[in-house]
Image (cartoon, rainbow, N blue to C red):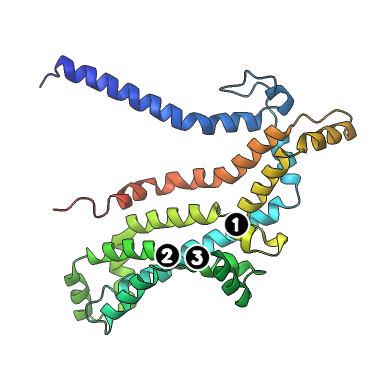
Amino acid sequence: MRETRGQKIFKVFNYTFLGLLGLATFYPFWYVLVASLNEGRDFMRGGVWFFPRVLTWENYAKAFNDDRIAPSLRISVSATLIVVVGSLLLTALVAYALTVKTLPGRNIFSFIWYFTTIFSGGLIPYYLMLRDLKLTSSFWLYIIPSLFSFTNFILLRANFSGIPYELRESAQLDGAGEWTILSRIYLPLSKPILATLALFIGVGKWNDWFTAAYYQSQAKLYPAATVLQRLLAEASAGSQVKVGQETAAAGGMTTYTSQSLQMAFVMILTMPIVVVYPFLQKYYVKGVMVGSVKG
């Protein structure tokens, strides 16, 4: 069937609009990357839009030379991995248990989960609770409070509820236990939603600077997001004077500026997520569509 003139015009307009929208979304990230790879003093002259005019790695070298960067990255990576694995496992166990129709007190447990989400104690009671649990000076501050999310529980339970209950009954007739049913049937059939939740949890934990900034009393236990947020603040507030002093001490050989350091800091925090996302993209697309189409 031949396309009408109106359809062709619409297709051209649609592709043009989507292309411009994609460019507008991608370009800020590309601009920050280019700025981080360009000499800071040369970048201040302007005119650097698409490619580095004077390529250099000095901005990243200066960023990683900071004694706080490497330890904070180790803390962020460890906390993110532990929370992603632990949260998915705990959420899957709870969601599966409350999906089993023969579980005693199933409705009561479900009501308790729902009811507790209505109330929030606020920042101060939450801090007092963390302090009493001795978490405000511990690495486990980033782990224990993040292991369970009610929202993730709802999504995973809805997905488990969509799996035919006959599969569970058939597996039980063949002698399978609860763990076997969960690990061999429910989890493999839930890869899309699990990948989606893993991405949400991982991105949220990796970018979480708030927890350490407000609740962590040990600066040596700050994650990368908090450290980089503070480095950005330092680079913005009077750091140009510090850069000038370092340049004079180095005999005028340094080329970075506070702005170029900020760009490097942002890229250091952003790149891990950008690298991981393509591997989860196909599952993510399926996961966000779970429950949206019936029939």
- Mark 2, residue position: 149
Residue 182 x %, y %: 32, 71
Q: Measuring from the top left, give residue 136's x and y in whole percent.
A: 64, 69
Q: State which quadrant residue 110 falls in.
A: bottom left
Q: Which residue is mark 3?
A: 146
Q: Is residue 291 above or below residue 165?
A: above
For marks 2 and 1, give the CA distance. Answer: 19 Å
Q: Are marks 2 and 1 in contact (CB under 8 Å)?
A: no
Q: Are marks 3 and 2 in contact (CB under 8 Å)?
A: yes
Q: Which mark is residue 76?
A: 1
**Residue 76 rendering spot, x and y as whole percentages:** 60, 57
Query: In the image, is residue 203 above or below residue 97?
Result: above
Residue appearing at x 59%, y 54% in the figure? 209
Specify which label sits upstream in the sequence, 3 or 1: 1
> Which residue is outermost to the bottom?
104
The three-letter code of the residue at mark 1 reads: Ser
| Front: mark 3 or 1 | 3
| Amino acid of disc 3 | Ser
Other residues around mark 2 within 10 Å, as few (<14) / some (14–19) / many (≥20):
some
Q: Is residue 167 left or right of residue 134?
A: left
